[in-house]
Amino acid sequence: MKDAAPQTVYLADYTPFGYGVEDVHLTVRLDPGKTRVQSRIRFAPNPEAQDRDFFLHGEELTLLWAKIDGAAVTPQLSDQGLRCTVPDGPFIWEAEVEIAPESNTALEGLYMSNGMYCTQCEAEGFRKITFYPDRPDVMAVFTVRIEGPHPVLLSNGNPVDSGEGWAEWHDPWPKPAYLFALVAGDLVNHPDRFTTMSGKEVELNIWVRPGDEGKCAFGMQALKASMRWDEEVYGREYDLDIFNVVAVDDFNMGAMENKGLNIFNSAAVLASPETSTDANFERIEAIIAHEYFHNRTGNRITCRDWFQLCLKEGLTVYRDSEFTSDMRSAPVKRIGDVIDLRARQFPEDQGPLSHPVRPESFQEINNFYTATVYEKGAEVIGMLKRLVGDEVYAKALTLYFDRHDGQACTIEDWLKVFEDVTGRDLTQFKRWYSQSGTPHLQVAERFENGTFTLTFKQRTPPTPGQDEKLPQVLPIAVGLLSPSGDEVVPTTLLEMTEAEQSFDFGGLSERPVASVLRGFSAPVVLERAASRQERLFLLAHDTDPFNRWEANRALAQESLIASITGAEAGPDTAWLSALLEVVKNAAQDPAYRALLLGLPSQSELAQALHQRGVTPDPDSIHAAAEAHRQTRAELWQADLPMLARETEVTAPFRPDAEQAGKRALGSSLLAMQSRLDGGAAAQAQFDGADNMTAQLSALTSLITIGAADSALRAFEKQWRHDRLVMDKWFGVQIAYAPPAMAVEMAGLLTEHPAFDMKNPNRFRAVFGALAGNHAGFHRADGAGYDQLADWLIKLDAKNPQTAARMCSAFQTWRRYDADRQARMRAALTRIADTPGLSRDSTEMVTRMLG
Ligand SMILES: [Zn+2]
């Protein structure tokens, strides 16, 4: 760790590197404690750069020797890298360094996981492998020789040659160093082949530890589907002879798109019906697609600097969401994405960590792999596509791929492509990349002489560093329904550009009911004073599946808030009866019906209360949600058995949308049933389950009603050998624990022999679950805050990246009462004052404290 004062990097300070790299040859001699990395790099002055300062990044490296054009040199070393005097023209740089992968617990650079070697170089990990201009705008062709006693030695690109104890790889596509990868270990593969649209044969492999080969088939099928989809929808085909995917147990993120050698957190690729839930299958399919799609949006066209991260991530998240919509149900995918956006991105954008989709400064770029860059970045692409239309979007993308292939680009390059194709000026639209915060959109309506007028007002509350906000371009999809439920105006896209703007719909014989922001056409907080009757009407009649769900969500939120604030004694039973009729409609997709049964999360309710000027009390929120669930179960009691029968799956297990939807609905119904029968049905399902979805949903139902002791023991006995399943076991006991017990449960589980804080999945299973147990984490005595702070301090010393990201559990601290605020502030201050705290966590905590 560096304890020097963290330096802030600014977008405005960008300058190109003084030298281009023509090619890179690396020889890596693997050894747990003394790996040697020899580099041979051909540099030439960059004609586009003024600055001739030859600085190579390098951290935690022991330099053994360095040469320029064969003559020994003695560079000036610092803890950030080295400087050296170099010739005026092209030259060859050679150096050898020593590193210790076995003691690398930060999981950045070259490290070891269960005896295998692997790498993670995005964003700035390559500088922990060798001295190099470790910045994405320096792109080069790599040739890599790996020496080590392992049966499998992999790197990027195509295999060149290999023998006993060595292998050579060559990647013909110029790439930035963050896409470098190396894997070595005792691995087995699940092989397959793919024929591209131009008839090229590609060898595919998923590499895993022996014993996991039975869990690769689904990932492989998802990979082939992704390759085909990118050809059919974007016209892009794969560009190497081989594509390798490797599963690694210790990994900070979900997966990494290294050229031709994707490295995956094993949780994001290994799947089997017995060990994976339907949600796991869907996530794996999406992540495989995401990393594969990066080959074009990220690898072949990369980012000029890390401020442009959303260029590759926003677009690639958008592409993977389109893929999932095509593979599964588009409305269900859209609703899931919006639930996720509101749960993760909205709190970020409305709190102290708020930043633009393209940040303008950072201290540690790893802290900006955020929901804002990824998910809001994808929403911005979706809005752009809505505004220009599908055909123009396709044309613009083709131009983007043609014009910028092999380049490191900016958001300006991206938008210029759309401006060139459409002739439109996108200056105002570009604010989506620079202005932080979530816009609030108010709607008023008027009906006069057959004309219905919608008047919108937008305002974005101030965010850190941005007090004044300008109006955004908002695509607002609207449809109008007649009072009898017919659609009188089909979905129409309104383009709002002013702070206040009205839109007229003429020629109407009676006052319509408006369905506003269909499909959640812009990522805003919609403030609409719709009546309960109008929402019930939309729940019954809206032709837009998103807005039907949204009407129900609003009814749920209003009912819960009325209970929390004491305005109503209990849930809105008239609405629950209306909802039951919708849920009983067997013609509706079960997955969609399962979404209708979901309630706003307790954290979301806290945010909604805060926005209305009410200080949220986590205990009252929890009590209201519990009372609501209990009332609903009792009210629907007579219909539950019939509904449950409808969700039975008799065919062999398939992880597809159809079966998954039935199981999702079945799980919601089982949770209700458990409140009525003391867990009898859940215990029976648990005992007879032949798939993880059924087993885990039964287990969580039992935990929720406090009847899971024997099931938890049985689950542990059955799965103690499987790390990924045990992560679930750790997580659910805390996530579904009664709030008063969550902290004790987390404490107890950290003493379990299988708890390993060095494994990010396990750490997140425990403390992610604690942070997610809203009333448990926000216990009035502050025990949740203290416990999380203690563990984040411990983790920071080993793995700063994961520790820093998990600090965001505190980001909503200003929502709560003075006492809780003081306790959270104290916990944050204690983290901030820890001697030797990483720059990752320092930056996060400092931003939150403000
Ligand atoms: Zn990505």
Image (spheres, grey):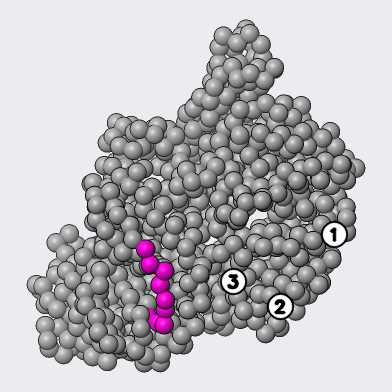
Mark 2 in CB contact with mark 1 (< 8 angstroms): no
Q: Quadrant of residue 365?
A: bottom left
Q: Is residue 460 above or below residue 51?
A: above
Label 2 is placed on what type of residue? Lys
Which residue, given by chain and number where applicable, does mark 3 sit on? 724
* Residue drawn at x 74%, y 57% as measured from the top left: 816
Viewed as shown, does residue 168 lie left or right of 674?
A: left
Q: Main secondary structure of the magenta part?
A: strand
Residue ranking furthest to the right: 569
Label 1 is placed on what type of residue? Ala
Which residue, given by chain and number where applicable, does mark 2 sit on? 717
Q: Quadrant of residue 729?
A: bottom right
Q: Which mark is residue 680?
A: 1
Count of numbered labels shown in the rendering: 3
Q: Report x, y in % for residue 834.
A: 60, 80
Q: Secondary structure at mark 1?
A: helix
Span colored in magenta? 184-192
Membership of 498 in magenta stretch: no
Q: Nearer the viewer, mark 2 or mark 3?
A: 2
Q: Quadrant of the C terminus?
A: bottom right
- In the image, 165 versus 831, the foreground residue is 165
* Residue drawn at x 74%, y 29% as measured from the top left: 536
- In the image, 407 versus 832, the foreground residue is 407
Q: Is residue 372 visible?
A: yes
Label 3 is placed on what type of residue? Leu
Q: Closer to the N terminus: mark 2 or mark 3?
A: 2
Q: Report x, y in % for residue 794.
A: 61, 81
Residue ranking furthest to the left: 89
Q: Nearer the viewer, mark 1 or mark 3?
A: 1
Disc 2 from disc 1: Cα separation: 21 Å
- In the image, 699 versus 396, the foreground residue is 699
